[in-house]
Image: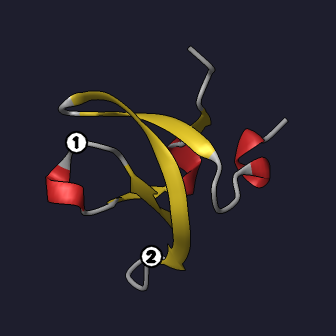
Amino acid sequence: MDQTKDITIGTPVSFDTDHGPQRGQVLSFKTDLSNGCRVALVKVPGTLNGEPWAMPVAQLQHAVAA
């Protein structure tokens, strides 16, 4: 099953980066005009001076409760 279909605004998600694993909440979605890919803007507390990460939805996973 494709879990990315269930990712909506407000969904807690996790994803891997060059800076290690990250966890945050989806704020909104946009389409990358260069390739048509669906991108989520994800708020990750304490990173990027409060700016959201722009992550392809296909790279997101539902965050597992700690």
Say above or below: 25 vs 18: below
- Residue extending furthest top? 66
Give the residue at x 65% y 62%. 9
The residues bearing labels 2 and 1 have C-alpha atoms spaced at a distance of 29 Å
Instruction: Find residue 20 and report its horizontal and vertical position in percent.
Output: 25, 25
Q: Amino acid at mark 2?
A: Asn
- Image side of residue 20 versus residue 6, left or right: left
Q: Nearer the viewer, residue 32 or 19?
A: 19
Q: Earlier in the sequence, mark 2 or mark 1?
A: 2
Q: Which mark is residue 17?
A: none
Q: Which mark is residue 35?
A: 2
- Image side of residue 56 versus residue 9, left or right: left
Q: Nearer the viewer, residue 39 or 10?
A: 10
Image quadrant holding the N terminus, namely top right
Residues packed near mark 2 inside 10 Å, few (<14), some (14 to 19) or many (20 plus) = few
Instruction: Find residue 5 and report its horizontal and vertical position in percent.
Output: 78, 53
Q: Is residue 37 visible?
A: no
Give the residue at x 55% y 39%. 13
Residues packed near mark 1 inside 10 Å, few (<14), some (14 to 19) or many (20 plus) = few
Q: Amino acid at mark 1?
A: Gly
Instruction: Find residue 53 and report its horizontal and vertical position in percent.
Output: 32, 57
Give the residue at x 25% y 63%. 51
Kindly state the secondary structure of the residue where label 1 is placed: loop
Res 34 quadrant in image = bottom left
Kindly state the secondary structure of the residue where label 2 is placed: loop
Res 24 quadrant in image = top left
Image quadrant holding the C terminus, namely top right
Mark 1 lies on residue = 46
